[in-house]
Amino acid sequence: MSTMAKLLPTGTPRPSAFLVRFVIMAATLLLVAPWLLSDFRLSLLAKFLCFAIIAVGIGLAYGQGGMLVLGQGLFFGIGGYAMGMHLKIVDAGEGQLPDILTYSGKYDSLPALWKPFSSAWFAIPMAILLPMAIAALLGAAIFRQRIRGPYFAILSQALAAAFVVVLVGNNALTGGTNGLTNFQSFFGLSVTSPSDQRTLYFIVVVVLLIVFLLTRELVLGRYGRVLIATRDDEDRVRFLGYDPARVKLFAYVMAAGMAGLAGALFVPVVGIISPALLGIVPSIEMVIWVALGGRTVLAWAAAGAVIVNWAKTSVSEQFPSGWLYLQGLLFVVVILYLPKGIAGAVEHIRAYIGRLPPTGGLRILMSSGDRPPKQAAKPNPTEEAA
Amino acid sequence: MDVIFNQLFVGLSIASILLLVALGLTFTFGQMNVINMAHGEFIMAGAYTTYVLQTAFGTGLLTLSFGLALPAAFLVAGTLGLILEFLVIRRLYGRPLDTLLVTWGVGLMLQQLARDIFGAQNVSVSAPGVLNGGMEIAGVSLSYSRLFIIAIVALVVVVIASYMKRTPAGRRMRAVMQNRSLASVSGVRTRRVDRTTFFIGSGLAGVAGVGISLLGAVGPTIGLNYIIDAFLVVIVGGLGQLRGAILAAIALGMANSFIEYGTTASVAKAGVFLLIVLFLQWRPQGLVVQARRGLAS
Amino acid sequence: MSSVMLEVRNLVVAFGAFHAIDDLDLTLHEHEVRFVIGPNGAGKTTLIDSITNLVRPTSGSIRFAGEELIGKSEHAIVRTGIGRTFQKPSVFDELTVLENVDIAASFRLRFRSLLKRRRGISDEVAESLDSVNLTAQRDEPAGSLSHGQKQWLEVAMVLVQRPRLLLLDEPVAGMTEKERLHTGELITQIAQQGTTVLVIEHDMDFVRRFAHKVTVMHEGKILTEGTVADVQQDETVREVYLGRPRDARGAAEALA
């Protein structure tokens, strides 16, 4: 019992430690950031937080499930286009054709692909469900055949690449390389007005926090344990009576849904969705956000998205060509020297410094999503007896 | 009839380019299980090598500079590969997913390097006089530069096959691929074989770059257009299998060509992807599978 | 005689020209503890592997409680009530000992219940941890356990699934004398509770102490079956063992 005593000092409020970190994080995003940042910076942050939603999904599929999802841009894009089409139709007004569709001169009325997206009740669910359905089909085909590792990575990437070709090839219908842009309103909000952009920011934050909490529950649940087990030894899991294909599929489908949701929010926040945002290149970038933050720690995966994009913006502002070198270097350095990302580095530093007060500053930053539950949730009666 | 013949030629032409790019990958991915995403940038290096030689020799000596470009590009890309192997890859053996991410980062840096050296604008390589024009067979015009690429591929395949089969170095390479530890205890210096394998695989990307420079403008991101399709060729062909890669490249090239005829390029792209996924339902290991005793390992 | 639990008929497992298992028949009854011995390469592990579909048999039939197993996927076979361990203990190093046993215990949960967090420790998990003496280590990562403890953990993981047929691949390899004794007692106890057990073992001392019925395999075939005493007296068994220098010592000991 001595080791357990070490792990669980009596009376340590571990469950509430997470709560403290979470509340501080939420308060920072909801109260401090809007107060501190200019309108411009705040809407940038909103954009990055959309990316953070994707990152949570990648943290689940890649960090916990070991699936290198290189095609998340596809799902992000589908979510974005679903929302984009809807907003375009609403902007155009009753009976009018969205500007994008008029350029080619091919359409007099809404094409069949666009028509259902007139309804928000169709567009919004589809932004999430369509990515999930595609992930389910691809994932089922791949996982069932025990195709894994790099094969899965490349196939998921190839699908994103094919999607871009399809988008660009059908420019009359999709806006081609320009994508969908020039949005005016989002459910009564004006996407160009700073105050409405602030409202959008709050929507994004709330959605992110909810997605994070739900994913965290998933990771801490038994399913999360089985997912880690599958990541580490898929064949062994099979001999425990689980079907690894199903275990992996679920995480992959959830990650796709999150990317779709992020895409749907991204459109009103940033005002554009285009193939350049979702091809091979951005899709791999999404993975490095997570790798930099810490692939096995959900909160850090999400933070990674914000950190990398913030760095990208700041560096590109000053050294336009420097960013590509830096980004390239980031891939190399993180994978070679920081396999657990910033989360791992922080853990090292913490171990090095030694004892820090349980709710010390670094601890708050370390709002980890996947520390094993141990007995955190509630101390066990048997344990007390022992 | 003409149509079929024409699409066959188009398909063969696509196949030859796919194969040219994928040949190098059968070494690095197939034999060493390294996902080298910088392979695309090695192609770019090969293409720029052609451009540099042309600029240096002037337009009067196009044929000569082009002839030199093939070995030069092989060396340039091969050397880049060696450096990459030494600095990065050798720390990551057995971690294919990580090699993918790291080499992608290296690729990004190489792209930016090319942009800084040659400018963001694309440059163009002119084909030597003998490759201008084409010939007409059965009403289908076959351009010389495409025929030339097919010839390069055929040549490279023959050279690789005989290298692997007949030379001691090639046999060592196959030994290491089939059973690393056994090869190692039998006295094969596996580290050295790794380096050679990586050198050849990367060098072949350079050769591919020379061929690709004939098809259009050369730019820093030229490799991106080919890299994914090339990996798909290796996956469909079966890991590390020369024969499989050849068959897969022909199959994918032909599928692309015939689906595209009558539809569009984007339908062809999506259709080929669908075919690949369906194919993998039938043969998850690819076309040609190396026979190994036992499945458990 | 109680009812037939496992019935293997005309089983062939071929790797190319090599037959790892060559036309093998084997019948296990309910509550039976069967030890399978034989020199290296006799096909013992391949037998377990083909029952659990880790290798695909070339031909033959394997029926478990009347149900054909060949053609079923691994997890489906486990779900029919067959548990196995591996020669090299394989547990999930990043999960705690408790979590390892807990996910093993949860394999029949509906997917929706699987999504929820574990609340406390179920009785059967606590019990199986206790039966292998790992209660004190339950919150340590499984990766930090010793080799022997990992073997125990694996046994706990398979026990908690309450299989009707348990396949153990060299369960006492690398264990101390005391641990062997405990394992043997555990196996006897499991069988008494109604589980059919098939044990592959090299350690003849262990076999002599805990086996009632022994099957001797050689070159993919069954050489002989019988009580320990029968087997010890069998001339062909003697030959098979003594004919192979690397097993000679063990055989001599066993047959002494």
Image: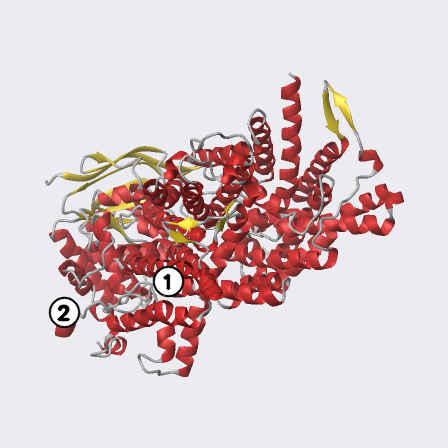
Left/right of residue C250 with respect to residue B267 in the rendered view:
left
Q: Quadrant of the N terminus of chain A?
A: bottom left
Q: Is residue C65 visible?
A: yes
Residue C114 placement (x, y as % from top left): 23, 52
Mark 2, residue position: A382
Image: C52 above or below B187 = above
Q: Quadrant of the C terminus of chain A?
A: bottom left
Image: B192 above or below B207 = below
Amino acid type at circle 1 is Leu
The residue tagged with tag 1: helix, strand or loop?
helix
Q: Is residue C206 visible?
A: no
Count of numbered marks: 2
Residue A253 placement (x, y as % from top left): 36, 47
Residue B71 placement (x, y as % from top left): 77, 48
Mark 1, residue position: A298
Image: A95 above or below C39 = above
Amino acid type at circle 2 is Thr
Residue A58 placement (x, y as % from top left): 41, 55
The quadrant in which residue A9 appears is bottom left
Residue closer to the observer: C233 or A370:
A370
Residue closer to the observer: C70 or B260:
B260
Q: Crowding at label 1, few (<14), some or many (≥20) Cα neighbours within 10 Å?
A: many
Left/right of residue A87 with respect to residue B181 in the rendered view:
left
